[in-house]
Structure formats: structure tokens, C-alpha cells
Image (tube, grey):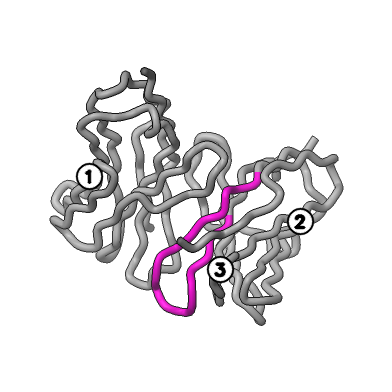
């Protein structure tokens, strides 16, 4: 069945450091891929998404490219800020869009 | 943007009691809402799909008599954990999608349930 494997945390970085959070997936069809972020005390929010191979999703300086050949959707940011401290979830959804499969979440702490 | 309100954010209860968690879409109507559960260090797992005006659809392995879902209106779905036990302690989160199409999914802030 479908599944998402996400890099375990927690991750602690200094401000302005480069961030990569790895995410790989297994899917029977052609899923859409997502990164969700959960800031402390808030709900999950969509950060970015990609709906087909080679698409790049980007938002707030974060990027992820849908790589079908490596079944990956790694999240990257060139220079993290303290305000990026949150838990990040990788997810996939099949064409119907109702069933989401999430990774375990990666907690990121950025220190000044 | 659209907001989904989930309440309570944290609940501690004694074993054997029932706990109700509410999920409200504040500025849109949601024909369908979803309930997820996350055990420590594990993935968010879909428990059930809540359909307004009809019975919820439960995922394999989720006991429908234990996790009662009611979706009585287009803006409210409730999850009741009946006769809770310590193994039900988990993080529960709901989500909702405006309308009936395949649009963006909005999540609540989650409920941390601890059963003593």
C-alpha cells in the first residue's frame, strides 16, 4: 500500500543554516505530494505541494521537487530562521484526494 | 483563509470514561471531514471519513463502536472515544475540505488525549 517515510528528528539548526528534510514515498498510482507544517499550538497548514513528476513546489523560501525516479520529495530551505521552528510533515494523496498518507513528522528547532 | 477549530486541545481523563472531541469549520461548509490519530513516533493515520448526514466510513482496524463519529451539520463533526483506556492515549486531529470537490484540506490544531 501507499506510505511515506520521513527523516526522523528532532533537527536543531543555527539561524541561516541550510535545511534538508528527507521524504520518500511508496505509491501504487500517481500521487500528489505535500509538505505540511505545524507551528506550536496551531493546526497543520499546507506549506507546498506538487502534483506530478518534476514539479517543484515552493513557498516561504522552502522548496521540494517531485522526483519519480527516486520516489522522493525532500524539503529544502537555503537559510532557516527562528520562525521556521515547527514540525514538518510529508504526505501523499492519491488521485481521489480523500486519503492522505503522512510521514511521522520532523521537529525543527532553529536557534539564534 | 479557511479555519478549522478543534476542541479541546488537551484532555486528561480516567480509564472507562468517554471523551468528545469537536471539529468545526468556521468559515466554510464541509460535506466531508476526516479524523486522524498519531501515536508517538508514528505517522498520522486516517481513522475515518465523516460524511454529513450519513454514517462515517472507518479505516481497517478502527473500531466504529469505540470511536463514534457524528457529522450532524455541514460545519461540525464530533469524535467520541467511548470507554477510553490508556492505549487510546494519542494525538487526534481533524481536517475538512470546503464543498464537495477535491480542494485544499484544512486541519484543526489537534487534541492530545491522555487516559490515566
Mark 1 vs mark 2: in front: 1
Query: Tag 3's secondary structure?
Result: loop
Instruction: Name the quadrant containing residue B102.
Output: bottom left
Residue B108 % position (x, y): 56, 54
Q: Nearer the viewer, residue B106 or B48?
A: B106
- Distance (Cα) linking label 3 and label 1: 29 Å
Q: Are marks 3 and 1 on the same chain?
A: no
Disc 1: CA contacts within 10 A as few (<14), some (14-19) or many (>=20) = many
What is the chain identity of the residue bearing mark 2? B
Query: Tag 2's secondary structure?
Result: strand
What is the chain identity of the residue bearing mark 3? B
Which numbered disc covers residue A63?
A: 1
Residue A26 % position (x, y): 30, 52
Q: Report the side of B53 relative to A20 (left or right).
A: right
Location of the C terminus of chain A by quadrant is: top left
Mark 2 vs mark 3: in front: 3
Query: Tag 1's secondary structure?
Result: strand
- Which residue lies under the disc numbered 2? B20
- Which residue lies under the disc numbered 3? B27
Amino acid at each position: 500500500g501507499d506510505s511515506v517515510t520521513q527523516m526522523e528528528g528532532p533537527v536543531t539548526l543555527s539561524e541561516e543554516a541550510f535545511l534538508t528534510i528527507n521524504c520518500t514515498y511508496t505509491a501504487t498510482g500517481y500521487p500528489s505530494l505535500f509538505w505540511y507544517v505545524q507551528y506550536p499550538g496551531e493546526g497543520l497548514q499546507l506549506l507546498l505541494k506538487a502534483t506530478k513528476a518534476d514539479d517543484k513546489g515552493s513557498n516561504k523560501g522552502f522548496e521540494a521537487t517531485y522526483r519519480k525516479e527516486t520516489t522522493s520529495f525532500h524539503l529544502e530551505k537555503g537559510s532557516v530562521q527562528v520562525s521556521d521552528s515547527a514540525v514538518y510533515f510529508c504526505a501523499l494523496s492519491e488521485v481521489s484526494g480523500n486519503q492522505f498518507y503522512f510521514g511521522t513528522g520532523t521537529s525543527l528547532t532553529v536557534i539564534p | 483563509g479557511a479555519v478549522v477549530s478543534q476542541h479541546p486541545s488537551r484532555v486528561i481523563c480516567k480509564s472507562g470514561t468517554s471523551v468528545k472531541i469537536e471539529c468545526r469549520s468556521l468559515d466554510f461548509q464541509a460535506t466531508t471531514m476526516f479524523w486522524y490519530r498519531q501515536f508517538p513516533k508514528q505517522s498520522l493515520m486516517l481513522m475515518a471519513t465523516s460524511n454529513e448526514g450519513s454514517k462515517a466510513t472507518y479505516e481497517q482496524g478502527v473500531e466504529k463502536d469505540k470511536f463514534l463519529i457524528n457529522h450532524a451539520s455541514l460545519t461540525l463533526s464530533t469524535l467520541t472515544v467511548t470507554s477510553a483506556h490508556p492505549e487510546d492515549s494519542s494525538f487526534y486531529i481533524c481536517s475538512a475540505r470546503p464543498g464537495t470537490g477535491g480542494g485544499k484540506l484544512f486541519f484543526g490544531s489537534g487534541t492530545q488525549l491522555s487516559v490515566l
